[in-house]
Amino acid sequence: MKGSTPRRLKKYVSKCLRLKAYLQSPGDGRRAERIPAATLLWALFMGVLLRRTAFAAMEALVDSRARTLGVSRRFGDDALAYFTERLDPVMTRQAAVTAVHQAKRHKAFQGCCFLGLALEGTGAGRSQEKGCDFCRPVRNQKREILGYHHQLVMVSVVGTGLTLPLGVEPYGPGDSEYKASRRLLRRALGNLGPHFADCVVADGEYASAPFLYDVGSLGLGVVARLKNNLPE
């Protein structure tokens, strides 16, 4: 976007992607609201665009006089933490689906042969002690626990020259990446509609009969990339 500014970006997100309602009401679950949800949500967006992943770094951006981020007031990093902990994920999932549908209507996927939904496992939130039911141990070769982190599966729209993240699904003790992927995929297809995508893209760990049959029952094909360390 030539000559882009936070104000112009917010206008584009609100009108072209039709996310105005989400920006104003993202599913704030705080009981005592002192700082508007719209202010904190936009600060999070700008932090991602400017590659500031820590809440303290976002606070520093807002406090800096050298930048105009379109944020109406200052706040502390603890306010962002409190806000994100209580956001309703359903609202954010629906906003992502709305943005993807708008991208398709605006011909962003025009010319692509196959539109895919890519599944990939990832991790986040490492800590020394277990903090919640979703914490999974990180072990060394001796099976000693080095710490804990959260493991998730992410789904993205691919095959268009764009990679559009659509949602994540955590899995904790007793769960697995495969089970979380099944939940995530069914939810994504339920939100997108049955004819949005052509196939599911995943790595060689998903090239198993149960997963292939599961995806086939949803009316999609599978593109599974085999890895050199898993030739079978």
Image: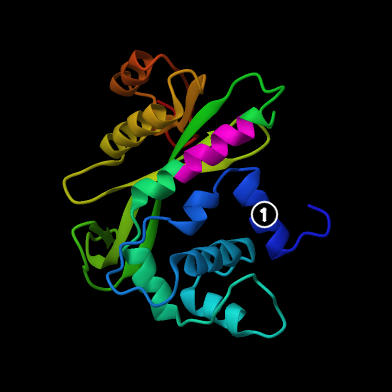
Residue indicated by mark 1: 11
Work out whether 212 lies above or below 67: above
Percent x, y of residue 194:
43, 19
In this orientation, which residue lies closer to the viewer: 2 or 121? 2
Give the residue drawn at x 33%, y 52%: 151
Q: How is the image coloured?
A: rainbow
Give the residue drawn at x 22%, y 51%: 172
Describe residue 175's horizontal placement relative to residue 114 as left or right.
left
- Residue 204 appears in the picture as rendered: yes
Quarter of the image containing the C terminus?
Answer: top left
Percent x, y of residue 86:
31, 63
- Are there few (<14), some (14-19), or many (20+) residues within 10 Å of tag 1? some
Give the residue drawn at x 37%, y 28%: 190
Give the residue drawn at x 43%, y 42%: 94
The answer to which quarter of the image holds residue 103 is top right
Percent x, y of residue 104:
62, 29
Residue range corresponding to the magenta coloring:
95-104
Q: Please name the predominant secondary structure of the magenta segment in the image.
A: helix
Residue extending farthest to the right is: 2
Q: How many numbered marks, from 0 up?
A: 1
The answer to which quarter of the image holds residue 45 is bottom right
Work out whether 110 lies above or below 6: above
**Residue 44 among magenta residues:** no
Describe residue 3's horizontal placement relative to residue 203 as left or right.
right
Describe residue 227's horizontal placement relative to residue 128 as left or right.
right
- Residue 153 appears in the picture as rendered: no
Work out whether 37 lies above or below 110: below
**Residue 100 among magenta residues:** yes
- Determine the secondary structure under disc 1: helix
Q: Amino acid at mark 1?
A: Lys
In this orientation, which residue lies closer to the viewer: 15 or 124? 15
